[in-house]
Image: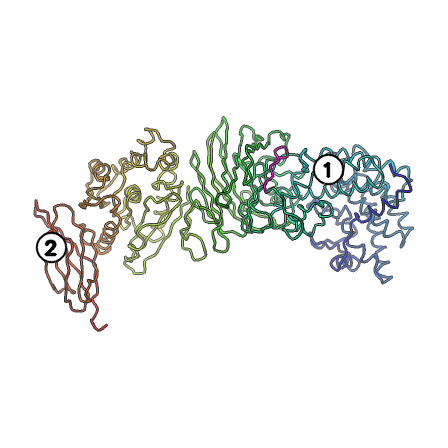
Amino acid sequence: MFEKEQLPVLRTIVEPLLPRSRGDAARDRAQQFLDSHIVATSAFGSVPYANGAMWATEENRSLGRFLHGFIFFGDWYGTVFEDPSDSTRQNAVEAALGIVQRWSGLYEEPADSSTMAFHDETTAQRLIALISLELALTPLAPEGVDTIIAPLMRSTAELLAKPNFHASGNNHGMFQDLALAYYAVMSSTDSLGIREDYFTTAMRRLKEYFSECFTAEGVHVENTPTYHLMVSRHVASVQRIAAAAGHEDAAYYATLISNAETYATHAIMPNGVYPPVSDTQQLDLSRSGMQSIFQSPEFAFASTQGRKGTKPKKRMLVLPKSGYAMYRSAWGDSASTFAFFSAAYNADYHKHSDDLSLFLRSGGVDLLSEAGPYGYNYQDPLTKYGFSQFSHNSLVVDGRSLPRTDAKKDKVTLTCTGERPDGFSVVGTNARYEDVVHQRVLNIREVEGVSELDVTDIITSENEHNYQLLWHLGTEVEVVTHGHGFELFHEGAKVLDLMVRANCPLRLSLHEGRMKPRPLGWRFPNFGEAVPTTTIALNFEGTNAELKTTIRLSGGCFNYVDRGLSGVDSEWQRFDAEIPVNYLLERAASARGKTRLVVIFSAINQPGDFTYNYKATVDEVDVNALYILDDFGDQGSYYHSDHGSEAIFRSVQRLISDVAKNLGIEADHIATAGSSKGGTAALIHGISLNVGRIIVGAPQTRIGSFVAEPHSNILEFMAGGTSAEDVQRLNSIVPEIARTVTPDSQIFILVGEKDHHLLNHVVPLVDGMTSTPNVTVLPNVTHGDIGRPFRLYLSASLEQWMEGQSEFFLPYALTEGEEVDSVRLRVYLPTNLQAAFSLFRGTELVEKIHYSANEVVAFNELEPGRYRVRIYCRSSSDRKTCAFTTRLINIASKDS
């Protein structure tokens, strides 16, 4: 209760809280109604008044709130109501009275109204607007105020005071009680006794609400930082009103404001705005006026990006009872790393299905983002999307989002397992699913000053489900996807990569600006504004699953080696099959080259280093060349399997078949090639597709035995485990496929005599095949030495293949000698093989060198021209000869 003598002071506090929009833009919007009977808005465009027909729309709830709440009148104060022109001012007064009178005639009773006419919060906004109208119009049209404004104010205040109309427990009820308190202070429409009763009712309800709507850690329960600010602003207003009225709750509100400030400070991103979680609108906090509410130097520092105030002492804040964990690498640096993790279900209002969502910003760019809010029209598919799990970095089960709200607040929890000066470890749990529990373990630390994030998702259920774990990307980044992760680039520079290690088969899919069968891949910068962005979905199935995700940022040690797959100049493409596959296709220039296709498979590199092999060699041959990345897992999959699933194998097969079909090339004009792991893949895919030629170097044909020790990560990825049975399962892949080989596929294998692959892999393969491959064994060559001779072997094989010549060839290198008029030839001879050489210029035989074990020969004092060498080989045992011809080499004139 307040005393009559306190009213003047209370009015000086309340009047500035009433909505008023000054300025040219506000004047122009107000003038449009006087000129054209149009309600002009910045958010909804122009709405024709149409003698009140504008209120009949129910398609857009946000617009309905704006119109039925008379919020547009905010543009009229300080503009047309105070216009120096008597006619403009009078027109404005008459128009305002006409609008209120028309609405009162259309909507007399709540039961007869449209949905938004007597919506709980909209009704409160309307009373606040009427209070402002009474204040502005009383000096100008007192009779109109008495007959039109005052009756509606009285009935509205009476409605707001009724217990059965009060929206208790949320900010809608708060607005109702604020409106009632403002009415009690500002209006003279009712008697002082009635207004005192309203004031008492409002203050009691506000205390009840504020006591319940903040957690014990001082966080507003409505799941969004901007509503935390908005409600805190009203807490401060109520505190000033309570203090001026000598109310007993004044001290309580002062303490509440202090407690709310910590969260408000730490939730601010390095760019001075809040992250787009739940219904948060991203506004510049330095211009929000909140420094007058939160008056500490720490909040001033955070909200002004360090231009004012004092740097907070802590960079991390974990609030387990509220469900939030926040991290930043530095204060006052707009490029610093900021992470916001939410495991919060504190109230139904403004709740999105964003449980366990992680937001990440670094380098001044949103990296892992959120869609943000689209609006409140629940019939709009984008509004539904914005509320759903599909717009957040969360887990979707069986293709259906959890409801926005339910009665399972206690099923979402956050536990802190460790706090450090440089980070924290937390566990978020979401058990709102019917029979699934999702736990997300987030560990953030700093290594040599660079932030690193590790995320472990543990999904448990007693039943089989289809799962989809989503990552939403910022609008300013470009993505390069891999089999089980992705890289992000900003303005050509790599800023993040993310790699997933799972205990089940994964399929990574990419979505951008999709509307059907449901929206996916959208960002909402403002209410009603939709911008396409990229969403990465990790798809898997089963009962239980565990996904370990490593997120690495610029300045640290990335998961993936940047091999130039990004950028506008990149020619790499992504084939969208059962499992998407990255590939590079280089087309031949000549008519002959266009009739053939060579498919190159890569060997094992270091973890995260995925690239092609032998491109320089193949570039020397004019032929269509297809390079396929084996970027599955952290070190490849032999282009075959993921935890027992052969979807990778099927997808690579389909890619090769589709490329060949598009090029008009039959299987007998396809060659597959590679060494080591790449050689194994060339065998697997070449035999399966019955291609014309398979060229391999030192392949692993017993995959399980090979990877068991040095590459147990590959064994576990491909087979799903590391047991003897898993080893044997991988060992059987090549032999089973090899048994299907036909004579149509010519297989050429190069291996070193000192390479363990000879006895452990090549010999068992040959012994188990019905069609004998051509095996060349090089003396004194180990597995580590096979690279250079295989490049030459591949080159020679492709030359012969393109010429349609002999099936016999050896690795060789034909180069100019030390003298300008000489040619040097190096040929790799297998054990017990001799070679003879004939040098030709055109069809002219220039010189012959007889059989010997020499591998290097030179031809000197040559005339200018184009030369090639015919190489004859024979063994010392059977004396049978084989021959092949080298490529051409040009000897230029001495004068050139």
Magenta span: 315-323
Residue at (50, 28) in percent of width and height:
461
Q: CA distance from mark 1 to mark 2?
A: 96 Å
Left or right, 826 with reference to 606: left
Give coordinates of residue 478: x percent, y percent: 49, 51
Residue 322 lies within the magenta run? yes
Residue at disc 1, secondary structure:
helix
Foreground pick, 147 / 193: 193
Residue at (10, 58) in percent of width and height:
849
Give coordinates of residue 220: x percent, y percent: 68, 38
Foreground pick, 891 / 112: 891
Amino acid marked by disc 1: Leu
Where's the C terminus, which quadrant? bottom left
- Classify residue 759 by image quadrant: top left
Residue at (54, 39) in percent of width and height:
423
Where's the N terminus, which quadrant? top right
| Residue 531 vertical placement versus 261 (above, below) | below
Binning the other alpha carbons within 10 Å of mark 2 as few (below 14), some (14 to 19) or many (20 upward) gives many
Residue of label 2: 836
Left or right, 255 with reference to 605: right
- Classify residue 741 by image quadrant: top left
Give whichever of discs 1 and 2 has the lower sequence position: 1
Q: Which mark is residue 231?
A: none
Residue of label 1: 256
